[in-house]
Image: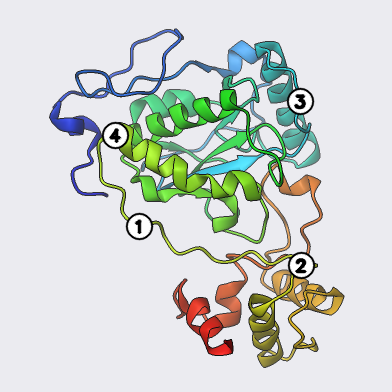
């Protein structure tokens, strides 16, 4: 927990984080008393969710990380209406339950391009308001007990998010961080946990800005962000790829050391992922994109050795230069 950052003593207010009932239009900024208000969030009943297939799991601890995703599908729609937000929430739940076999929507919350926030998995809003427990979702493999996830409508590999979505994302993340005492440096992208491009290169690069905004609103210092594992994809070239190829060869893979992420390198990475059970995506976005053979946060530790730190790849990279 960051020094000086506690939900119930934020900005020296000494006030409990009590949320008034009802869904009125609010923005997650600090008031004069230091209280962070809840943004407008539409519950599962309001957008017509199906009941969950099984009982929702509520963990007796808050999440450690707030994780940002992008939905990829249905693309970057120009429909900014609340009706569209409800429609994509229903479509996503149907896909997760019927095609993925999950008990409910995978993520806890969804934000449409129009900036409308909807509850994803049932009870997520109720438990967020408590601020001490956590609804377990299905959005980051192996980390679901520690992560609360937000899906953002659209594909952000090249295009930026609309201002309406960005403002709501900042509001929701600020409120989450406030309720759960999550330090701003623990606002992460999905790719910080696995070999996926989610939440897209453009949105991922803006997470530093998001952390800064949240820290400013909470009145807490922003410590340095955690080191980032590089994400390598087919077609990439350079020293990072060369380092990965050398590490792959040390583990017996038959790959060139030409610094080009070609088919042989992709197959070698995919084989390692499959052998460690890392080849099945858990994010709604990743199911729509062929990310087989991507090399990211869950593969680097396997190549470097489990005892290595996140910054070890930088030291190894420096040796190549």
Secondary structure type for disc 1: loop
Name the residue carrying label 4.
218
Q: Is residue 319 above or below residue 137?
A: below
> Is residue 219 toward the left or the right of residue 100 in the image?
left
Q: Residue at x 54, y 57 (%)?
A: 192
Earlier in the chain: of badge 2 and badge 1, it is: 1
Name the residue carrying label 2.
293
Q: Residue 125's x, y, as percent?
A: 47, 24
Q: CA distance from mark 3 to mark 2?
A: 29 Å
Earlier in the chain: of badge 3 and badge 4, it is: 3
Which label lies toward us, 2 or 1? 1
Name the residue carrying label 3.
77
Indicate the quadrant where residue 240 lies: bottom right
Disc 2 crowd rating (10 Å Cα; few below 14, some 14-19, many 20+) is: many
Secondary structure type for disc 2: loop
Secondary structure type for disc 4: helix
Q: Residue 205's x, y, as percent?
A: 56, 49
Is mark 2 in CB contact (under 8 Å) with mark 1? no
Earlier in the chain: of badge 1 and badge 4, it is: 4
> Is residue 67 toward the left or the right of residue 218 in the image?
right
Q: CA distance from mark 3 to mark 4?
A: 32 Å
Q: Residue at x 26, y 19 (%)?
A: 31
Q: Residue at x 20, y 49 (%)?
A: 3
Q: Nearer the viewer, residue 132 or 192?
A: 192
Name the residue carrying label 1.
224
């Amino acid at each position: 927990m960051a020094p000086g950052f506690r939900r119930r003593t934020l900005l020296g207010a000494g006030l409990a984080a009590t949320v008034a009932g009802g869904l009125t239009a609010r923005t997650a900024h600090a008031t004069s008393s230091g209280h962070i208000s809840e943004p407008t969030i539409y519950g599962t009943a309001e957008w017509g969710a199906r009941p969950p297939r099984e009982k929702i799991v509520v963990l007796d601890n808050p999440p450690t990380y707030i994780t940002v995703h992008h939905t990829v599908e249905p693309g970057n729609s120009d429909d900014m209406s609340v009706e569209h937000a409800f429609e994509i929430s229903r479509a996503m739940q149907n896909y997760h339950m019927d095609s993925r076999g999950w008990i409910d929507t995978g993520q806890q919350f969804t934000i449409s391009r129009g900036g409308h926030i909807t509850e994803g998995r049932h009870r997520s809003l109720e438990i967020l308001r408590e601020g001490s427990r956590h609804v377990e979702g299905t959005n980051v493999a192996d980390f679901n007990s520690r992560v609360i996830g937000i899906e953002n409508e659209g594909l952000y590999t090249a295009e930026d998010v609309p201002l309406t979505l960005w403002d709501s994302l900042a509001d929701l993340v600020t409120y989450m961080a406030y309720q759960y005492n999550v330090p701003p440096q623990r606002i992460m992208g999905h790719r910080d946990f696995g070999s996926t491009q989610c939440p897209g290169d453009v949105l991922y690069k803006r997470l530093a800005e998001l952390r800064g905004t949240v820290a400013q609103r909470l009145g807490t210092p922003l410590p340095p962000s955690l080191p980032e594992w590089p994400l390598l994809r087919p077609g990439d070239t350079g020293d990072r790829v060369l380092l990965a190829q050398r590490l792959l060869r040390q583990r017996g893979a038959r790959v060139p050391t030409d610094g080009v992420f070609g088919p042989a390198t992709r197959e070698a990475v995919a084989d390692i992922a499959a052998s460690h059970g890392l080849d099945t995506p858990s994010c709604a976005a990743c199911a729509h994109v062929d990310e087989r053979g991507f090399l990211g946060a869950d593969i680097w530790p396997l190549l470097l050795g489990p005892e290595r730190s996140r910054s070890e790849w930088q030291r190894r990279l420096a040796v190549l230069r």
